[in-house]
Amino acid sequence: MSRVWNFSAGPAALPEDVLRQAAAEMLDWHGAGMGVMEMSHRGKEFTAIAAQAEADLRELLAVPANYRVLFMQGGAIAENAIIPLNLMGDKRVADYVVTGAWSVKSQKEARKYGEVNIAASSEASGFTSVPPMAEWRLSADPAYVFTCTNETIGGVEYPFEPDLAQIGRGAVPVVADMSSHILSRPVEVSKYGLIFGGAQKNIGPAGLTIVIVREDLLGRAMPHCPSAFDYKTVADNGSMYNTPPTYAIYIAGLVFQWLKAQGGVAAIEAQNIAKAKLLYDFLDGSDFYENRVDRACRSRMNVPFFLRDEALNDAFLAESKAAGLVQLKGHKSVGGMRASIYNAMPLAGVEALVDFMRDFAARRA
């Protein structure tokens, strides 16, 4: 069986080594006589799996000791509600930096639980850039500042790590949705109060949400916050207050081990830089395709592009699929094409895409 080059934005491709190991352990994990998805989440076998996954994630991201790692459910969309329920507290106001479709959705959801101040927005540029911090206008006393540091749909990635100390507001926690680029590059966790992300892009299968939260932000949940979504309750129970997505945690743990075998986050970043450079250099040198994102803010993970003659879109998608290159259609809100080149996508896959794009353009010159 031949596998395709899968450029899906999520659920996305997983490393083949991980898939093969999971297949080998499907019926019998390490002599337990059963597979992971059959295990009690409170049994010694699974608690060992979860503990190792957390330890490996902490190592990969150099998570400080005063941060808790939570394994939750509901994806990033659920976190758009869970975050204000936990962090707005008595202040009931939060600041949002809006850089694309996902941060638009995030701030809309937060309005159900309190007041939202748009501290900065790149809407005027068509969400093709990130507003510099000098332009951020924070409210007087926000509970937190929300950022989406990689916009999956628009292909916009922060070219800097938000550091509110630079604008004299270092006491305000920064919240970051890193769903589509977590573990793709080093991150200074201590600059954030909370980092979260759905697993289905760079970590594992859909169903698992990773939350990394500073301990002093626990215990602030609104009275009507559901217990299973109260960060303190989840932390106090080691992410086992309710049954967590056990198989997704297991796969995430295998991905973390795979990442460590690649040399860690710094090593995978070098690979991601090479992949993105190959694709962007080709796009920039073409008069057949174009990328519309500010070059300083281009995502390494999600590369949207357009055929200058959009009448050829259907032919491009049909022929690329026939060539074994799938899930290249852009999001319906943006159109065009999008190649998501997460950690599990090897350089060979991007090379195959560029070769196809070059050939497709040449045949229609």
Image: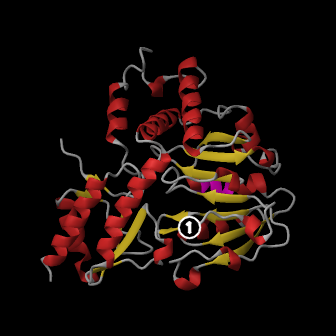
Task: Indicate the position of residue 224 as horizontal and vertical percent values.
Answer: 79, 49
Query: Chief secondary structure of the magenta span?
Result: helix
Residue under the image location 32 percent in, 60 percent down: 327
Above/below status of 20 relative to 354: above
Which three-letter amino acid code belongs to the residue tagged 1? Tyr
Question: Residue 115: which quarter of the image?
Answer: bottom right
Task: Indicate the position of residue 207 as horizontal and vertical percent values.
Answer: 51, 44
Task: Indicate the position of residue 87 as horizontal and vertical percent values.
Answer: 77, 54
Asked whether the viewer can see residue 329, the reply is no
Asked whether the viewer can see residue 271, the reply is yes
Report the side of 96 relative to 329 (left or right). right
Residue 239 covered by magenta stretch: no
Residue at numbered disc 1: 158
Question: Residue 125: which quarter of the image?
Answer: bottom right
As drawn, the residue found furthest toward the left would be 363
Residue under the image location 53 percent in, 20 percent down: 45
Q: Which residues are magenta?
A: 77-82
Report the side of 9 relative to 307 (left or right). right
The N terminus, quarter of image: top left
Task: Indicate the position of residue 127 as horizontal and vertical percent values.
Answer: 53, 77
